[in-house]
């Protein structure tokens, strides 16, 4: 299946890195052209879109899209890694009666919109050419620059007492690059207590949801029984469905496939936005909307071959 192209939405199991999943898919489909659209930590489960073949050219667009997570924050102590895999750093007895749903919702409101986060030491961010997690394993702590991320919504599901501590169950929709571990630490601090991320599951990545996802074990079982591995794959056309579609006149198709700009006289689109140009059912490419002397036109970013 070395000529396969499309997007597989994997339900990543705990205990595997995103790179491990990519390696498994390479073996199953017999192709090196494989890439994922957003790293999940080894113990995190959930939606991991993996692009194969020509679809790898979509990675840069798909990874920029918002993500949604189911989160459990434990209030009572912090850890070295800001999640449940690390060693306890600071512990504080919690007045469990003070952590009410009303209070948690009020704190959530403070974190909506654009916020700043300092990346955790156990992260893949590079400082002076070295990954932070490598420095952390050496026992080195370095100063990290705060980064701006966006929290689109925080939905509280449950506040419950566990072993003298408080677990807060919520869903978060956020921009690329948001650290849920750090968000839990910061939310806990706003509530007056040390906290960490107890559990995390990604339930949506861009347009892809849990309903689109197939467990990796199920995919491997399908392969072992000689099943059709293309069946669970989404086409490139389906994968770009989050972008507006524009039909191109037949006489302009060759020019578009050659990467030439094409006018958009009847298209209502925002300058700088992305669109997909089609000829019938054939995806010609992903284009950026630009404005010239004669109005809007489409400038090629990715042109796809006719077999896509």
Image: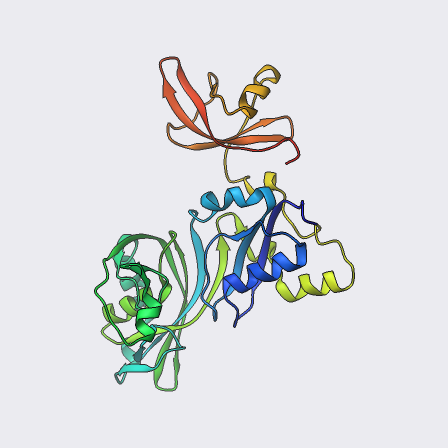
Q: Give the residue at the far top of this rendering.
A: 294
Q: Is residue 305 above or below residue 15?
A: above
Q: Nearer the viewer, residue 23 or 85?
A: 23
Q: Nearer the viewer, residue 276 or 136?
A: 136
Q: Is residue 125 left or right of residue 286?
A: left
Which of the 4 image quarters holds residue 193? bottom left
At horizontal 37% and vertical 64% (from top left) the residue drawn is: 180
Whole-percent x and y of residue 142? 23, 67
Whole-percent x and y of residue 82? 33, 72
Q: Is residue 297 left or right of residue 194?
A: right
Which of the 4 image quarters holds residue 102? bottom left
Whole-percent x and y of residue 175? 37, 51
Q: Quadrant of the C terminus?
A: top right
At horizontal 49% and vertical 46% (from top left) the residue drawn is: 59
Whole-percent x and y of residue 55? 57, 43
Q: Is residue 147 left or right of residue 242?
A: left
């Amino acid at each position: 299946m070395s000529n396969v192209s499309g997007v597989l939405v994997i339900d990543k199991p705990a205990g595997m890195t995103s790179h491990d999943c990519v390696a498994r898919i390479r073996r199953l489909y017999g192709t090196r052209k494989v890439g994922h659209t957003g790293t999940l930590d080894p113990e995190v489960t959930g939606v991991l879109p993996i692009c194969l073949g020509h679809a790898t050219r979509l990675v840069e667009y798909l990874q920029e899209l918002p993500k949604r997570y189911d989160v459990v924050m434990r209030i009572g102590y912090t850890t070295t890694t800001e999640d449940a895999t690390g060693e306890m750093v600071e512990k504080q007895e919690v007045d469990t009666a003070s952590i009410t749903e009303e209070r948690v919702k009020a704190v959530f409101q403070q974190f909506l919109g654009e916020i700043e986060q300092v990346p955790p030491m156990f992260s893949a961010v590079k400082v002076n050419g070295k990954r932070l997690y490598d420095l952390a394993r050496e026992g080195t702590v370095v100063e990290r620059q705060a980064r701006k991320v966006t929290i689109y919504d925080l939905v509280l599901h449950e506040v419950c007492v566990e072993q003298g501590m408080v677990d807060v169950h919520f869903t978060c929709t956020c921009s690329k690059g948001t650290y849920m571990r750090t968000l839990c630490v910061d939310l806990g601090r706003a509530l007056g207590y040390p906290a960490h991320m107890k559990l995390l599951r990604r339930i949506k990545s861009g347009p892809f949801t849990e309903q689109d996802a197939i467990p990796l074990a199920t995919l491997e079982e399908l392969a072992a029984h000689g099943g059709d591995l293309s069946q669970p794959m989404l086409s490139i056309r389906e994968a770009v469905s989050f972008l507006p579609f524009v039909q191109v006149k037949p006489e302009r198709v060759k020019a578009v496939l050659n990467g030439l700009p094409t006018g958009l006289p009847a298209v209502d689109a925002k300058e700088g936005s992305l669109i997909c140009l089609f000829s019938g059912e054939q995806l010609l490419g992903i284009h950026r909307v630009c404005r010239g002397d004669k109005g809007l036109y489409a400038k090629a970013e990715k042109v796809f071959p006719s077999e896509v």
